[in-house]
Amino acid sequence: MQNIDQFLSDFASFVWGLPLLFLLIGGGLYLLIRSKFIAFKYLKHAIDITAGKYDDETDPGHISHFQALSTALSSTIGMGNVAGVAVAISVGGPGAIFWMWISGIIGMSTKFFTSTLAIMYRGKDTAGEIQGGPMYFISEGLGQKWKPLAVFFSIAGLVGALPVFNVNQLTQAIRDIILQPNGWDYGVYSNLAIGIFLALITAIVILGGLKRISKTASRLVPTMVLLYFISVIIILIINHEMVPKYFVLIFTEAFDLKGESLLGGALGTLILLGIRRGAFSNEAGIGTAPLAHGAAKTSEPVREGLVAMLGPLIDTLIVCTLTALAILVTEVWQTGENNGVSLTAAAFASAFPSFGKCLLMITVTAFSVSSLFSYSYYGSKCLSYLIGADKKHYYNYFYIASILLGATASLNMMINLIDGFFALMAIPTMTATLIMAPKVLVAAKDYFNRMKKI
């Protein structure tokens, strides 16, 4: 297991090198500038679309704009926001959060382009059903000669969509918050029991298909975000005198070249850490969100792009920031005793000594379980593209079995596994998006010109 752990660590470090940083951040910045900051100019219109103002049941697709965003958010607003932020702070200090913000801001533009393309170039699976996502906009938008790139994305997506990190951190939360304080035995067998329980819950939902997943997500996501938001705001109010200090520290340490907390002063490494955790949080440029948004009921591709860009705003710029400030102002990050979800739990316990960890347990469970549902849909779409829609259900069994792996393996092993395959998924997604960006800009100009006349 130690050799596997080291291999996955080396693999993740290799694929998350400077070339991918330039592709994700440089490419995203290019899209942001080329679109003249479209992600920020039409925020109100994006909210109106999400609220159902332009919904039309006769449009092609399977789910509403709101359900598409909820499905995408239920995967991004998960352990990446609770445990991923904690990992970033424990390894890179407060400055890592600044680079997560940069990733989120640029990610809004990236998601606009990728999800617009997911509707512009929808294809049909072998069952004749309309489908969207990177593999389809690559093969439909760039032509069949680019199909190897679409296949590459789909193969990487089979592993990238596995829920192992979320399960790992939920298992850790149950152990630290419920089992250990009550003096109950915990170890491999308790982890396995938790994994089996989560596998059963997941099976009930995901075997029901996309509509059951999207309906469950659209109920869970708003509730869990609100509960988490209120909880963290109370933590910040309790520690209000510390908020300005740490808010400033996020900016100053983002460019600090001396502190040991900043990986020995390696600014480039700190930036990569922030970008990796930002990508893990909002998945902009990775290609998972377009798989959900590609199923939206709409005949206007630009509308779904506008809805999708709300994702990084909510999960990275709002939820991740709240998590980071909660960890920083309670100063639990300086102890060095915790990592991942345990660090966030320590922050909640510091603010609410009697019930803080239980409160986090409730929100963490909602975050994790909702993520379990959505990622299965992504993986089954990848398998459907590779071997046919009639065989996509086989992925669900592989997916459910992987929950047991996530519950029993180490945190580093699981996070490096997903990080590595996220990086592989980003290569075809961003390459195709940058090539087809001019087509999105033409569609956007046409759409907004028509909207002005209404």
Image (cartoon, rainbow, N blue to C red):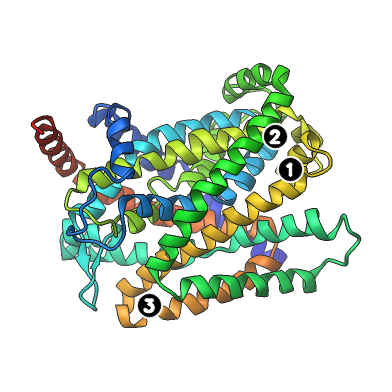
Q: Position of residue 148 (x, y in %)?
A: 27, 66
Image quadrant for the C terminus? top left
Q: Can residue 340 be seen in this view?
A: no
374 sits left or right of 27 in the view: right
The residue wearing badge 3 is: 392
The residues tagged by marks 2 and 1 sit, at their Cα atoms, a distance apart of: 7 Å
Closer to the camera in the image, 101 or 29: 101
Name the one closer to the observer, 377 or 333.
377
Residue 370 on image: x %, y %: 53, 58
Q: Residues within 10 Å of mark 2 (few under 14, many from 20)?
A: many
Residue 219 in the image, given as x and y percentages of width and height: 48, 55
Amino acid type, callout 2: Ile
Does dot 3 land on a helix, a strand or a loop?
loop
Mark positioned earlier in the residue sequence (2 or 1): 2
Q: What residue type is labelled 1?
A: Leu
Mark 3 belongs to which amino acid?
Answer: Lys
| Alpha carbon distance from label 2 to label 3 | 41 Å
Asked if labels 1 and 3 touch by Cβ distance under 8 angstroms, the answer is: no
Question: Extreme right residue here?
Answer: 183
Q: Which of 69 and 15 is in front in this view?
A: 69
Q: Residue 327 carries which label?
A: 2
What numbered label is drawn on residue 343?
A: 1
Image position, residue 410 (x, y; %): 70, 61
Marks 3 and 1, the one that precedes in the sequence: 1
Graded by Cα atoms within 10 Å as few (under 14), some (14 to 19) or many (20 or more), the crowding at tag 3 reads some
Say which quadrant the N terminus sits in.
bottom right
Examine the rendered structure and indicate whether residue 140 appears above or below residue 364: below
Marks 2 & 1, CB-CB < 8 Å contact: yes
Residue at image position (14%, 34%) is 451
Q: Which callout, 2 or 3, points at the residue further toward the start of the chain?
A: 2
**Label 1 CA crowd tier, 10 Å (few <14, some 14–19, many 20+):** many
